[in-house]
Amino acid sequence: MPKAKRKPIEPVRIRLKKNDLVEVIAGKEKGKTGKILKVLREKNRVLVEKVNLIKRHTRPSPQTGQGGIVEKEAPLHVSNVMLICPKCATATRFRLTVTGEGKKARVCRKCKELIDG
Ligand SMILES: [Zn+2]
């Protein structure tokens, strides 16, 4: 049996998806905005374009060519980002609703505008 007990990651309902515009609301990247590149559901994290960059030192390889220092996005916890409403242009809370066509859509709590087209 391994000594170190790893805390199981409890999955949270992630209502964000790829290409959503989000603002970072906590941590050292607070205040930055960017587009979601990837949602890592099993880790409750998202990759946000140009946010939380980490430097990777790489060796020259056939894939990377030259090697050296590469900047890469590190995943952020979903609770540290907030969706930006395209209408209000601010980080906002939203709720889920069902549209006339029976599709799930997100609605801005502030302006009541549908966030998904
Ligand atoms: Zn809004």
Image: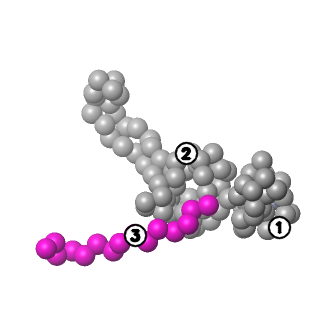
The mark closer to the camera, 1 or 3, is: 3
- Kindly identify which residue carries mark 3: 9
- Kindly identify which residue carries mark 1: 110
At 48% from the left and 58% from the top, the residue drawn is 41
Residue 12 badge: none
Q: Give the secondary structure at mark 2.
A: strand
The reply to whether the C-beta atoms of the residues labelled 1 and 3 are less than 8 Å apart is no
Residue 86 x/y as whole percent: 78, 52
The mark closer to the camera, 2 or 3, is: 3
99 to the left or right of 11: right
Within 10 Å of disc 3 (Cα), the crowding (few <14, some 14-19, many 20+) is: few
112 to the left or right of 98: right
Residue 74 x/y as whole percent: 45, 52
Q: Is residue 3 magenta?
A: yes
Residue 37 badge: 2
Q: Is residue 106 magenta?
A: no
What's the magenta region? 1-15
Q: Which tag, 1 or 3, sits closer to the chain's start?
A: 3
User: Which quarter holds ligand 1?
Assistant: bottom right
**Amino acid at dot 3:** Ile
Residue 42 x/y as whole percent: 43, 60
Within 10 Å of disc 2 (Cα), the crowding (few <14, some 14-19, many 20+) is: some
Comparing 116 with 43, the one in front is 116
Label 1 CB, ligand 1: below 8 Å? Answer: yes
Q: Is residue 87 above or below residue 8?
A: above
Q: Is residue 42 in sight in this rendering?
A: yes
Q: State how far apart marks 2 and 3 are (Cα).
A: 21 Å
Comparing 112 with 25, the one in front is 112
Q: Which tag, 1 or 2, sits closer to the chain's start?
A: 2
